Amino acid sequence: EVQLQAFGGGLVQAGGSLRLSCAASGFTFDDYVIGWFRQAPGKEREGVSCISSSDGSTYYTDSVKGRFTISSDNAKNTMYLQMNSLKPEDTAVYYCAAEFSTTGCATQGFWGYWGQGTQVTVSS
């Protein structure tokens, strides 16, 4: 059974940092794309960042470029999102997701596996 568990959220002041982790079980990252999404109150879910296991390519939405870094430890089957210089507009529930794919994650339209969300709150 594929399971994803996200953790590491919390309350932080603007300008601070957090690192989110997503532990996967039931599959290995080989031939999967894995990514982070977020949903703020009253807003649609948006893709934040993703990484393709096939070639290590990454994608970041424009609003987090230069501030967030995605990485994965395939030996631990864990994905991370290092978030620096956090802004109040980064406040959201963050979800990790995965899908079988051998192509780049930026164009991945369907994500079949989701973890529970972890709340990130950035105070001004």
Image (cartoon, rainbow, N blue to C red):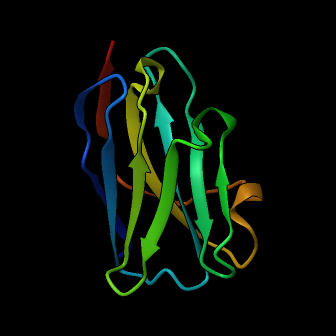
The location of residue 30, given as percent across then percent down, is 55, 85
Residue placed most toward the observer, 9 or 63: 63
Vertical relation: 33 (above or below) 107: below
Could you say which quadrant of the image residue 102 lies in?
bottom right
Q: Is residue 63 left or right of residue 7?
A: right
Vertical relation: 113 (above or below) 7: below
- Identify which residue is drawn at 74% across, 68% down: 104
- Identify which residue is drawn at 63% across, 75% down: 56
Q: Is residue 105 left or right of residue 47?
A: right
Residue placed most toward the observer, 102 or 58: 58
The location of residue 33, given as percent across then percent down, is 60, 69
- Identify which residue is drawn at 73% across, 56% down: 106
Tell how many labels. 0
**On the rendered image, what quadrant is the C terminus found in?**
top left
The location of residue 53, given as percent across then percent down, is 60, 78
Visible in this render: residue 116?
A: no
Visible in this render: residue 28?
A: yes
Vertical relation: 89 (above or below) 111: above
**On the rendered image, what quadrant is the N terminus found in?**
bottom left
The location of residue 6, given as percent across then percent down, is 30, 54
